[in-house]
Image (cartoon, helix red, strand yellow):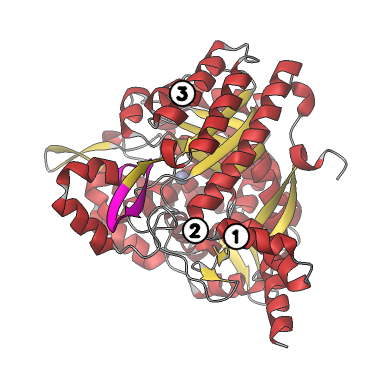
Amino acid sequence: MKEQNEINSLKSKISQYANAYITYDETALDSNRRKIVELFYRAGKIIDTLFLKQAYSKNLEILAELKKSQKELDKLRLKYFEINFGPFDRFDDDKPFIGDLQKPMGANFYPDDMTREEFENFIKNNPEKEQDFKSEFTMIRRQNGNLIAIPYSEFYKKELTELNRILVEASAFAEDQTLKNYLIKRAEDFLKNDYYESDIAWMDLQDPLIEIVIGPYEVYEEKLFNYKAAFEMFLTIVDKEETNKLKLFESYLPAIEKNLPLADKYKKFGSRGLESPIKVVNLIYSAGDTKAGSQTLAFNLPNDERVRKVKGSKKVMMKNIHEAKFEKILKPIAQKIIDSSQLPLVAFEAFFNHTLMHEISHGVGPGIIQKNWKTTEVKKELKETYSKIKECKADILGMYNNAFLIDKNVYPKEFEKNIYVTFLAGIFRSSRFGINSAHGAGNAIIFNYLLEKGAYFYDEKNQRLSVNFDKIRETIRELANLILTVQAEGNYEAAKIIIDKYGVESETMKKIQKKIVDIPIDIKPIFQIEKGSNL
Ligand code: ZN
């Protein structure tokens, strides 16, 4: 009986992830690039293993056991293990779904039984070792009762030497010099245990088709101190059409800045351009850290502040992942909560355009401001309210600026309705991940404000939402003005009031969330490159 309960519980956990077939246009690649992609796919498999090892000390043993077993329960466990890269549920606070194991806060980057105090005391007593111990690229282990730091290049020597070999082999097929340069430098850096040179080379990557990231990057897997970087890979192909669309948007930046609903005295007319260059790509294969649990829609790298200082950072958005989440999550949500008369207006094109414009909108509006006759930054003045207000701004301006481009005849007039209705449904996708996240709160502010002002309508009878097209444009303008003014004045108190009043899960939101609990929370990618095209 107990086993049956576990089987049922695992089945329902697995069903939270909708299988999504991740495709790309293979025919766009010439034979050399195909060879590179093939090699990178092999590199991705190594990255998967590296991350399994980093995430939990017993991962490989458990995986081998599960693979041997023929029991139904173990097959389900294996499936969920593969989604989570370990026996802990990433959607449920890392609770174990096999036995009563417990995931160490520091994952496998430190000895399982090491405490925060032990680490801190060690550094206090051995200050000359602080840098090595806090490095993103060392493992901490115990030797004769003492802590030691071992560079990744030594600890994972076998895997990193193999990665070095694969990248060097791939570089021989690269015709584009910037790609060749990146591959050679990254291959070297795997052995040097210092990724600076190749991060710089990555910022210069200009291959018209291949966009690839491979290495240790994010530090969130290590929850003890957030020091240690986990291995991941994104192998992608550039989407030319969307990249051209972005260029078009960028050319409108000065006009967009000028058109902001903000008092002239607060406007900066010199364009500061995009916060970071944006590329739109389609994912071919992802590996390691990024694939565990929920799937990333976009990434902004590198994290190394030294590189950011010289080169800035690059934002890469994956169109086919957006498409998969739209089909498997957003559309089913819309079908349950949007009034049937407006349902046909929910469209992928609108969803993706909004996402692009959201990113572009981060780069417009107040950044460096004047307050009390002093030069300061929005970020410093708004303190902990900053990121919620910032995400709210990007979303509200995403709509506002798209409407502006429609006025400029960049899109047909009818597209405006698609944008508003698709965004409304999207609010309930984003806010599922918690109203306290920057994106969740930003969305809640928009929803509750627009509902209060009558730009959104909730029909109690059929429990569905619709957009009031007579009011929406003006209300968006009003809210955009409010948010931009808070930023321009660095008005912390006003930001708090807005968040306390609107950035909360209102009763209406709760009712709507209840209707969509059964819809998958995320996708489980099934890669074309792995399964072939006849799935
Ligand atoms: Zn954002």
Label 2 residue SS:
loop
Q: Position of residue 235 (x, y in %)?
A: 62, 33
Mark 1 within 8 Å of ligand 1, using the beta carbon: no
* Disc 1 target residue: 61
Label 3 residue SS:
helix
Callout 2 amino acid: Ser
Mark 2 packing: few (<14 Cα in 10 Å), some, or many (20+)?
some
Residue located 69% across and 63% down the image: 66
Q: Nearer the viewer, mark 1 or mark 3?
A: 1
Label 1 residue SS:
helix
Q: Earlier in the sequence, mark 3 or mark 2?
A: 2
Residue numbers of the magenta segment: 134-148
* Disc 2 target residue: 57
Q: Is residue 355 above or below residue 281?
A: below
Callout 1 amino acid: Glu
Tell me how far mark 1 sits from mark 3, CA to CA. 31 Å
Q: Is residue 180 above or below residue 280?
A: above
* Disc 3 target residue: 188
Q: Is residue 181 above or below residue 72?
A: above
